[in-house]
Amino acid sequence: MAHDYGSHKLTEHGALNHVPVYRSRPVRIALYYALGGLIWVAMSDRVLSLMPAHSYTLNRLMFVCVNALLLYLVAARYMKTIRISVAAREEALVRARGYFESSVEGIISTDSNGMIRQLNPRGQEMFGYHEMELVGQPIEVLVPQRFHYRHEAHRSAFFAAPRSRAMGRGMEIAGRRKDGTEFPVEISLNVVHMHKGKLVIAFISDITERRAMEREARRNETVDALAAVAAGIAHELNNPLAVMASRIELMLASDQDLSVQTRDDLLVLQKNIERASRISHNMLSLARQRPGSRQTVDMNVAVEEAMLIVGAEAKGSLLRYETILDRSLPPIMAEPTGVEQVLINFILNARDAGAHLIRIETGPMPERAGHLRLSISDDGAGIANDVLAKLFQPFFTTKAKGTGLGLWLSQRIIQDHGGSVAVESEVSKGTTFTITLPTMGESSGHVMPAAREERPAPAQIAAARSSRSGR
């Protein structure tokens, strides 16, 4: 539509379905035939005037018949030429209309004043308008308000030196739908020269999906980099953890007289070393893109075990924990340490947000059969809307000493289990994280348990794991 034949397909209103058939060539042929006929008649009269008088009537009758036959042949050929020309133009019109209506890109035509003349069906779907709502409106209707001034300047510069080209190269271009929402677009501009000025045909592509794929590719690159970092950290952690585990094991096994409090403290340290070792093991699994060993897990038990680790600090403070657990929930197929890590991370985040009450609730997911729901709510400072969109991005944090990896890793672990994480928050009123996970029957269809296959632990801390309790 950006070529010369487009000038025969658009009326002054830019509508393809009201196209006049220009007959300049058939009219020109008709003039040639009429001129030839007049010359022929004049010559015929001249020839007849030179003939004898007694044969004038007969010869004139003969010339009239010949002229009538020639006129018929000329008219027949002329009508055939018109029919062929009209059929060709109508076929070209139908073909152009088909291209216009079936295009996967939005097509908008505007005049030199920036007024919309036409919009194809894909453009109507893309922007949410009917064509008649836009015809005669300025093109800025489809541009976000903050870009209006810049767009008008670009449009004026384009018409000063019009040429077919991509629009806004090197810039972020957005379109504005009827409901006010915005979406990223790519636009190519083509100029059509009309009898009454120029038309600009804009081909518009919605690149939302492509941008999402680009973000996903960048995220995967980040994940790969983090995986390498995680593998290095996990490897370096194993050595000091093994030393601490072996020393505590020796102290507990020795005959020295330890007080009950000291022995209890050593057991707590031993349990947390084991947990740190399991987290290190999970980081390695995450780095290798392989899920850890799966087994049946009661989500209520997982909540209670997480509370044993983080709940002690609530004693003597203003922080309170409240649990509402549905004991009828079916188990899930999960990696226990990963689930525990997620719960502890969300609970500690709620604590760091200045919460006075943290409520943990489990229950079925009414909207999704075969799934359970776990929510962690707090009455802390809440999260601003602009922060919510970035909350699960790696390295993004609002904490002065945060790494920005906790929520990202938590979401990754839940997604690895076939679940999802949602967050709702209101500034100064608190935040709620909701985890959705498939239960045993549902998850068995897409998560294969690792047949109780445990990766071997480092030799130095194998002894420490032999006394592990609660699992």
Image (cartoon, rainbow, N blue to C red):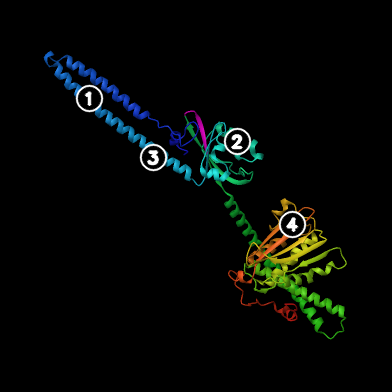
Q: Which residues are magenta?
A: 195-201
Mark drawn on residue 91: 3
Of the two numbered discs 4 and 1 on the same chain, state the one appearing first in sequence.
1
Q: Where residue 379 sits in the image (x, y, percent)?
A: 80, 58
Tell me the kind of residue under disc 2: His
The image quarter containing residue 61 is top left
Q: Where residue 155 sits in the image (x, y, percent)?
A: 58, 35
Tell me the kind of residue under disc 4: Thr
Q: Looking at the picture, does residue 180 appear above or below residue 408?
A: above
The image quarter containing residue 459 is bottom right
Q: Are marks 4 and 2 in contact (CB under 8 Å)?
A: no
In 3D space, how far apart are the residues under numbered discs 1 and 3 (Cα atoms)? 34 Å
**Direction from residue 359 to residue 82 in the image, left or right:** left
Q: Residue at x 61, y 71 (%)?
A: 441
Tell me the kind of residue under disc 1: Ala
Of discs 1 and 3, which sits in the foreground? Answer: 1
Of 131 and 408, the residue lying toward us:
131
Classed neighbour count for the residue bearing mark 2: other residues with Cα under 10 Å, few (<14), some (14–19), many (≥20) = some
Q: Where residue 318 sits in the image (x, y, percent)?
A: 86, 63
Of the two numbered discs 2 and 1 on the same chain, state the one appearing first in sequence.
1
- Secondary structure of the residue carrying tag 1 is helix
Tell me the kind of residue under disc 3: Glu
Of discs 4 and 1, which sits in the foreground? Answer: 1
Q: Are marks 3 and 2 in contact (CB under 8 Å)?
A: no
Of discs 2 and 1, which sits in the foreground? Answer: 1
- How many labels, in total? 4
Q: Magenta stretch containing residue 453, yes or no?
A: no
In 3D space, how far apart are the residues under numbered discs 4 and 1 (Cα atoms)? 95 Å
Of 145 and 465, the residue lying toward us:
145
Mark drawn on residue 154: 2
Name the residue tied to disc 4.
397
